[in-house]
Amino acid sequence: MTAAALALTLGAAPAWAQSIAGTVQSGGHPVVGATVRLPELDRIQLTGAHGDFRFADVPGGTYRVFVEILGYAPAADTVLVATAPARVSFDLRPSAVPLRGIVVSASPTARPAHELFQPAESRSRLGLDDRPGSSFAEKISDLPGVSVRGNGSAPSRPILRGLGDNEVLVLEDGLRMGDIATYDPAHATPIDALGIAQIDVVRGPATILYGPNTIGGVVNVITNLVPAVADRPLSGTVALEGNSVSDEFAGYSNVVYSSGHSALQASAGGMHTGSTRIPLGTYSDPATGAAFTLDRMPQTFDHRAEGGLGYAYQGRRVTIGIGGNHYEMNYGIPGVPPNPDWLNVPPTTSRIAQQRNTVELRSLVSLGGARVDRLRLDASYNDYSHSEFPTAQDSTGVSDPQANHFHKREFNGVLQLQQRSAGRLSGTVGLWTDIQSLTIEGDQPLGPNSVTTGLAAYAYEEYLATPVTRFQAALRLDYNGIQTHPYPQSSDSVFQTLDVSRTSNAVTASLGALRQITPGITASLSVGRSFRAPTVQELFANGLDAASGTYSVGTASLGPETGLGVDASLRGELGAAAFEVSPYLNVISHYLYGFLRGDTIQGFPVRQFAATDARLAGIEASVTAAPLPSLGLRASVDYVNAQDTRRDVPLPFIPPLRGLLRATYRESAWTGMVEWRLAARQDRLGDGDTPTAGYAVMNLGLGVRLVHQGLVSRISLHCDNVFDRVYRDNLSVIKDFVPQPARGFRLNYELIY
């Protein structure tokens, strides 16, 4: 191929580049601190003291500009960048409820939720502040189809439509996190809620863009580890939080210095909590009926710290950046009370210490070629260590011998070529790789040392059939290989010599259709085939996991699981109201799960990994309305019916019918909120599950937003579990002896500059 032909294929960027500038107002007054997005170039700016913003060095082309800020309805406009600077102005309408969020994780470029083929939703930084809990999973558990499985204060993990662990993929900035949170319910995801800029939730199979482990969906935690070049020298955030229910105090800050084409960012944060208060100051053991006068649940502390640096360069053709972060966490896991003197003799419990070091690369090259418009390369490397320390009671007190130590190193890389639209056809092709190296040491090593390799190639295409109808088709080819390595020093004789390999290949695909029925209402239908290979733990586990109080046993003959998911959605906006109804069906062949088989090893119940077939069918619905400009109302409901179709019994630990009622008041700088979270009784039980009573919990909130010379401050006070109800999380494996937290008062402060 000649140099001229190659240039025609990939293309050179236009010889000219300009800027996109504008203002954001409401009723003639500037709106400060609004988020302005240029999704095609993956850029974000915040409006300044006069409601102004500017994107520099924008290559020629047509772009959509989106504006979002809490308290106003989102807005969008399309601009053409040619040989002169482009300008755009927005006049936002006050709204007590957000009507359309911008989701960055459900398609190759960011889009409003109503333009997506799959049900998806995003939550901003300020939206997270208004939700109870301290973990990222708790902050999104009010979204339809999203629940949380808790195992104490720290190890909370999202459950999507009844699926969790290895069926739901939790990402950071679209890349793998390198942790082992799916190994056990007691394992936490190493990320701090205060350092999150946005969370995207994609419900249903999302395997094409993100690979295996997405049979249930994707939760993408966006931390902006790599900074964006701002249109002013100094920018950043400061976030503080305190909570009386656990004596929590937490803080996070990041500062970005921008000059010319470059930006340098430094960040730091941490959290310290004591043991969590329980309702009424009384604990009753459901198994024995024994009563304890306890104000707090022992061994539920959580201590975290992090720090990071990042650099980015933004030029006419190239945006590239690198960021690094160190994160450490030390938390406790509550255990079953072993004696009637719990106050003076603690229960058998454990604590876990984690460290995670991350390096992330992000780049986008604007080619402007005849066939390839943009090239994106994102990659991350994680070095993660995890140690479990069981506490054993003896005559001298409590000792802390080290039981297990995990060390995982993971590289994840994605190369995408975004095609230039060819008539009505547009799309993205990509290459994906993920390499994991895991070593396990200690008294009970649980599994062998291993290397897991994943490789994939995929194509994602969209066709604009008519101005109101779009179709989507995607195809992905996956390879997954596991190789165990003998470890002569292992305390398990099998792992000293185990040298086996497992490979799995898969073809996955998705089809989608979206039609705009009226200017405000759209309907969509998507069908996706997903795939997941068994993990090293599911194949070869053999050891005591003190954190969960079980002895895990793998099954070496397990094969991969595949899912076929069907999603339908009807969503729209009618004036100041919005609604969404999403029924779905997910049929999983060779569904991999762990069950308590009824015997014990070393005095602990055995958790065996096995395979079956499963069917999960459900519905999610929500409606928001603003009967007055200052009053917003929201109601939502979700339900999933999950069945083991091979044995014709329910799957265990499935969320019950849930509901949410929320009223929000916004007037000038003030906001107020009252909500009821409701759950029905769950007595449709699977293996190892126990009945859980229904509940209704009320939460209150009050906040004020202050603007001064371009500085935006928001202070909010919340009361969670107002009536101090005793209720239990149906999904928790320790729900029978650990109730949910008591009434707590939470204070949040956020500064944006």
Image (cartoon, helix red, strand yellow):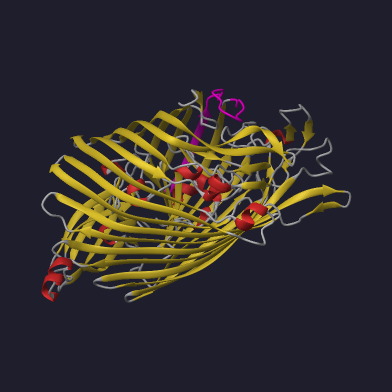
Rendered-image quadrant of the C terminus? bottom left
How many numbered circles does the render carry? 0
Residue 59 covered by magenta stretch: no
Viewer-closest of 408 and 153? 408
**Residue 120's spot in the image, x, y percent?**
36, 42
Q: Is residue 259 left or right of residue 420?
A: right
Give the magenta range. 669-693
The percent coordinates of residue 353 (x first, y second) are 65, 57
Relative image position of residue 400 (x, y in whole percent)? 76, 55
* Closer-to-camera residue (439/714): 439
Does residue 280 appear to the left or right of 593 in the view shown? right
**Left or right: 298 in relation to 438:** right
Is 690 part of what is drawn in magenta? Answer: yes
x 55%, y 50%: residue: 181
- Above or below residue 631? Residue 706 is below
Please state the horizontal and vertical placement of residue 57, each as a whole percent of the image. 24, 70
The residue sitting at 59% across, 38% down in the picture is 608
SS majority, magenta: loop
Image quadrant assignment for residue 296: top right
Q: Is residue 84 above or below residue 188?
A: below
* Residue 85 shown left or right of residue 345 in the figure: left
